[in-house]
Amino acid sequence: MSLNETQIERYSRHIILEEIGGAGQEKLLASKVLIIGAGGLGSPALLYLAAAGVGTLGIIDGDVVDLTNLQRQVIHHMSDLGIEKVKSAKNNIKEINPDVNVITYHQLAKADNIRDIIKEYDFVIDGTDNFPAKFLINDACYLEKKPLSHGGILKFHGQLITILPDQTSCYRCIFNSPPPPGKVPSCSQVGVLGVLPGVIGTLQATEAIKYLLNLGELLTNKLLTYDALKMSFRTVNIGKNPSCPLCGDKPIITELKDEEQQICDLK
Amino acid sequence: MKLNVNGEQIELRSELSVNELLTEQNVKMPDMVTVELNGQILKRTEFEDIKLNEGDNVEFLYFMGGGNVIE
């Protein structure tokens, strides 16, 4: 693939970076990234990856846009209320960069569909909002040997880790299994500062681009934690865990299964 | 006894288990926390028995979802 004149202009600030150049930009245009969840984390990740000229963006989301989303899910607008998030995201990406081929999956990531989808991609971003999905994505990426960026947010805090299957620690190396049902904070206790997923999702997009272009050092074997109130970033070293049920010495997870979904009790 | 919790030094008056440290540090939802001790992720079943020592580095790592109401 070679760049046309409009592309040379559009991506000029990338192309003049000697670490990227024309060759790097062509590589981005030939790359495929899957974003699971077009919500708080997925919004900034999608917007920046689209603007950066990642040639193919896959989006999985089974939801429609509602008013409570607009506090943080910046890819969706007022005019998108009520429509599928994947469609809204696709439309708004096209407004930014028509170079990008957007493939949408209006469904939830489940044990019986996720492996077939992620197979097609070079890098996966987890922008989901629940633990069963996060464990499923981690396991699926491990089984398909796909690199993954995990992101999580809670109130004023965020976390991030990049996972290269077999080579670096995975989500289950840290968090063995989903928290026990009933122990997850109730809805009234959970909320999130709107800008928080903007920070974490943008970092996830950064990791995707670094991976695709083989730039710098990835956030592997360390969990980054962000505290917006203290405005502090810390990284905690986390090596591969020999007792990890997925990638440890004696793995007990060898195929995917759906974990039970937590039901929110709004009473 | 001095040790580090999430990068900050704290002082303990007596020997504590990991479980007791979680309580002492006012962690309200211990089921939502994984504990790393000196670079090793602990099993939840070890929280009761493992005692902390001078100079230990402890990290409380929280489960974090996506900020939706269904967590």
Image (spheres, coloured by chain):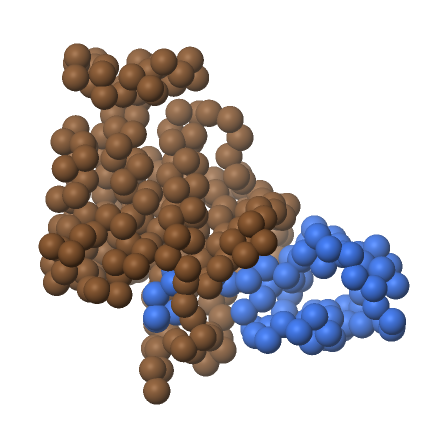
Residue A242 picture location, percent across and down = 62, 52
Which residue is nearer to you in this view: A81 or A42? A81
Residue A248 in the image: above or below residue B19 = above
Q: Residue furthest bottom?
A: A267
User: Percent position (x, y) of residue A143?
Assistant: 40, 48
Q: Quadrant of the N terminus of chain A?
A: top left
Q: How many marks?
A: 0
> Chain letter for brown?
A
Q: Nearer the viewer, residue A145 or A134?
A: A134
Chain letter, blue: B
| A181 is higher (above) or lower (below) than A2 | below
Asked if residue A132 is positioned above or below residue B26 in the image, the reply reads above
Judge from the rendering whether residue A145 lies leftward or rightward of residue A42; answer left or right. Answer: right
Q: Is residue A112 left or right of residue B40?
A: left
Q: Quadrant of the C terminus of chain A?
A: bottom left
Which residue is more in the foreground, A17 or A162?
A17
Q: Position of residue B47 (x, y in %)?
A: 70, 71
Q: Kindly identify the residue that appears in the image at 46 percent across and 25 percent down.
A: A215
Task: Answer with left or right where residue B61 lies relative to residue A69.
Answer: right
Residue plotted at (42% across, 53% down) = A196
Which residue is at the front of the view, A44 or A265?
A44
Q: Is residue A87 visible?
A: yes
* Residue B37 makes an appearance in the image: no
At horizontal 77% and vertical 68% (from top left) the residue drawn is B50
- Quadrant of the image occupied by residue B26: bottom right
What x and y, as percent, mark residue A125?
36, 45
Relative to A80, A203 lies left or right: right
Which residue is rendered at x = 64% and y = 46% of the image? Answer: A237
